[in-house]
């Protein structure tokens, strides 16, 4: 601001100097006796404006202006981050007793830990007197003296005849082939290999064994299937009822099949084999056999 004033002052002085150079010189005026009180001379040329003074001291504060109109509400700012969790407030007063209905019974909780051992109780009253148990047997006394011979008793009745304890066993075999188209056909045999007490215990023509006495018997049998049949079935029978059965399936091939069983028999019970199909056996090689013995 001060620079502008200085420049303006320089331009004013220069203009004034140029104006004086173009005017005629002013002749000196003779001093005229005038009244210094009521008379003034001609107006002088205005002087060059002075340089503006420096800034004055700050004036006192003005009066407060009137309150302005409320501003337009600003837009809602973004939600700030959650603040730190404050300290728990003081415990509130106990509320009034509620009047709601009873809730559903919760599930049974797990058993709590064992409590501390209780104080030992006082000793109970003495029980009733017990009954003593019998004592141990004493040591046998010495053998007494031999007594007199008594009177003879009556003769007893004759007992029943006992069964023979002789071994019962047999083995029979076929010496030729045999065929059957029914499972109920009995398998006959050609000869005995062994028989005890004698050969009457088995009928070769029907292959039927008859038990001489009651007991448990073991029976074993074996046969060779012919290659001209598809399969063969063998059945061990007790009194006409099947006990065990075996079979084989091998078309166009020979196949050996066998079986065994322990059977309880009463005296007079019968045991025999039945078969379906065709089996092989010969005089040289005896592939079809039947054995049994009492235990």
Image: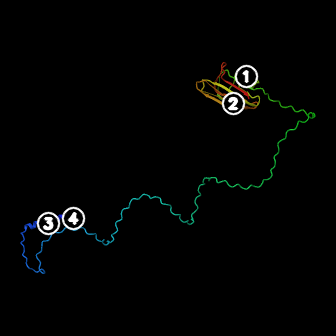
Q: Which of disc 1 and disc 3 is earlier in sequence?
A: 3
In depth, the one of 184 and 230 nearer the eye is 230
Q: Which of disc 1 and disc 2 is earlier in sequence?
A: 1
Instruction: Check contact, mark 4 vs mark 1: CB within 8 A.
Output: no
CA distance for labels 2 and 3? 159 Å
**4 or 1: mark nearer the eye:** 4
Q: Which residue is mark 4?
A: 2
Q: Which residue is mark 1?
A: 194
Is 167 situated left or right of 34 in this image? Answer: right
Q: Position of residue 209 (x, y in %)?
A: 73, 27
Q: Residue at x 72, y 25 (%)?
A: 170
Q: Which residue is mark 2?
A: 261
Q: Secondary structure at mark 1?
A: strand
Q: Position of residue 28 (x, y in %)?
A: 7, 73
**3 or 1: mark nearer the eye:** 3
Is 41 situated left or right of 199 in this image? Answer: left
Q: Position of residue 51 (x, y in %)?
A: 19, 67
In depth, the one of 80 and 186 nearer the eye is 80
CA distance for labels 3 and 1? 176 Å
**2 or 3: mark nearer the eye:** 3
CA distance for labels 4 and 1? 161 Å
Determine crowd level at label 1: few under 14, some 14-19, many 20+ residues with C-alpha closer than 10 A: few
For the N terminus, which image quadrant?
Answer: bottom left
Query: Which of the 4 quarters of the picture holds residue 217?
Result: top right
Question: How many numbered discs sit on the rendered protein?
Answer: 4
Query: Could you tell me if residue 172 is visible in this image?
Result: yes
Q: Secondary structure at mark 2?
A: strand
CA distance for labels 2 and 1? 20 Å
In depth, the one of 64 and 233 nearer the eye is 64
Q: Which residue is mark 3?
A: 13
Which mark is on residue 48? none
Q: Which of disc 3 and disc 4 is earlier in sequence?
A: 4
């Amino acid at each position: 601001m001060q620079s502008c004033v200085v420049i303006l002052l320089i331009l004013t002085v220069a203009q004034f100097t140029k104006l004086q150079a173009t005017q005629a010189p002013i002749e000196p005026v003779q001093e005229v006796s005038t009244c210094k009180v009521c008379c003034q001379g001609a107006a002088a040329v205005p002087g060059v404006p002075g340089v503006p003074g420096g800034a004055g001291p700050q004036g006192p504060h003005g009066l407060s202006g009137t309150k302005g109109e409320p501003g337009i509400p600003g837009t809602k700012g973004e939600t700030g981050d959650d603040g730190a969790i404050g300290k728990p407030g003081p415990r509130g007063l106990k509320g009034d007793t509620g009047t709601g209905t009873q809730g559903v019974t919760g599930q049974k909780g797990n058993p709590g830990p064992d409590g501390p051992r209780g104080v030992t109780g006082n000793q109970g009253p003495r029980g009733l007197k017990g009954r003593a148990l019998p004592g141990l047997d004493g040591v046998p006394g010495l053998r007494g003296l031999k007594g007199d011979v008594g009177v003879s008793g009556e003769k007893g009745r004759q007992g029943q005849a006992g069964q023979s304890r002789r071994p019962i066993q047999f083995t029979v075999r076929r010496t030729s082939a045999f065929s059957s188209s029914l499972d109920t056909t009995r398998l006959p045999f050609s000869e005995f290999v062994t028989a005890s007490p004698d050969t009457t215990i088995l009928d070769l023509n029907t292959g039927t064994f008859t038990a001489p006495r009651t007991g448990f018997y073991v029976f074993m049998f074996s046969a060779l299937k012919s290659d001209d049949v598809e399969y063969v079935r063998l059945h061990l029978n007790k009194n006409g009822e099947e006990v065990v059965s075996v079979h084989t399936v091998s078309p166009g091939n020979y196949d050996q099949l066998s079986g065994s069983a322990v059977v309880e028999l009463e005296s007079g019970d019968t045991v025999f084999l039945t078969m379906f199909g065709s089996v092989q056996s010969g005089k040289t090689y005896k592939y079809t056999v039947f054995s049994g013995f009492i235990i």
